[in-house]
Amino acid sequence: MRKIGFFTLTPSPPAPPANARTLAALRRALPGCEIEVIEVIPRLKRAPLAYGTAAAVAAATYAPDLLRGNKSLRHAALRTPYIFRWIKGMAARVARDSNFDATFQMQSLFDASAPGIPHYVYTDHTHLENLNYGAAGAAAMYSKAWIACERSIYRNAETVFVRSTNVAASLMRDYDCPEARVACVHAGSNAATPAAPADVTAPGQRKTILFAGIDWERKGGPTLLAAFRRVLARHPDARLRIVGCAPDTGGVANCDVVGRIPLSEMPGHFASAGIFCLPTRREPFGIVFVEAMWHGLPIVATDIGAVPDMVVPGVNGALVAPGDATALADRLCALLDDPALAARQGAASRRRAEDRYHWDRVAARMVARMATAAET
């Protein structure tokens, strides 16, 4: 391939760092290919009538959820058939005028396919996968008309690349995607990866439990706080470090609330912790787990979504049911009780990351699939 169109919603930043990581990895994997970036939202903003109409349609479609605060107008505007058709038309014109040999899009919120041009999607979710998260997922659902639009994204793709096996299963189960058009290629770390994990020997470091997430409620923060109270009864010198948000911890001892930080500072927090814990309630993927694995940390998390792909109980951590503070405390204490167990599981995390969750390996899997498709 000589030229590929790389479609993304927003520039990076503020787009998720995975967008830039994916683009860079594809460029390394295809050194002789020109990859042109097309940013959807800036083009939409240059069409004020379309942008305003999208907001009006979303306000009418999702009024009850918007009034209850369950959805934001900005996100809802992207989940209407009106704006879906606008983006599809724009993308097809760009692809045709640019003479792309293939098109590639990040996530499945729009359709950048064009007739006669092989198209690839890389996503960490399907909308219907939300139904597997109970009430937390039900609140995130959008209209049947939007789901019909999403279904067409996968129908028009040569291959849908996904980050995890649960999303691959959803594509086949919920969207009738043939198995031959779905490929699980995983994902890499957004934060810088260390040449080798830190040697967790200092007691203060070994007994530090790290939580990293912006959405305290959705990421299971209250459950972790309840579990940590139980942990302190057995390990009064344990510490909980909370990065990414600044919740009220209710006076629980030994809690260090760091708050929102730049991504560049995350490696230092991974390196100074002994356990990573994120008992999330709903998670499209969770690249923070990958980052914890690269830093050689044992992981205690919940058995939902993509997490079981990354955390194998008894190998590199433990999994509990969402909301189960008692089980969470028991799993954390098992690691605090046995430093040798924590060290073995941390080393297994690092090996799993090196084997599976490396951006260059991800891109190589994609490019091999694209090359095979081009030959047929």
Image (cartoon, rainbow, N blue to C red):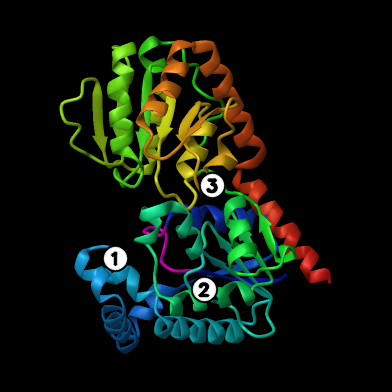
Compared with 89, 132 (above or below) is: above
Q: Main secondary structure of the magenta part?
A: loop
Q: Nearer the viewer, residue 233 or 88?
A: 233
- Which of pointers 1 and 3 lies earlier in the amino acid sequence? 1
The secondary element bearing badge 3 is classed as loop
Residue 150 is labelled as 2
Q: Is residue 192 visible?
A: no
Q: Amino acid at mark 1?
A: Lys
The residue labelled by disc 1 is: 71
Q: Earlier in the sequence, mark 3 or mark 2?
A: 2
Q: Which residue is mark 3?
A: 306
Q: Label 3 to label 2, Cα distance in Å?
A: 20 Å
Residue drawn 21% across and 39% down? 247
Percent x, y of residue 15? 41, 59
Instruction: Specify the quadrant that holds the C terminus.
Output: bottom right
- List the single residue furthest toward the left: 251
* Count of number-bearing discs: 3
Mark 1 → mark 2, Cα distance in angstroms: 18 Å
Disc marking residue 356: none
Residue 7 makes an appearance in the image: yes
Other-residue count near label 3 (Cα within 10 Å), few / some / many at <14 / 14–19 / ≥20: many
The type of residue carrying mark 3 is Ala
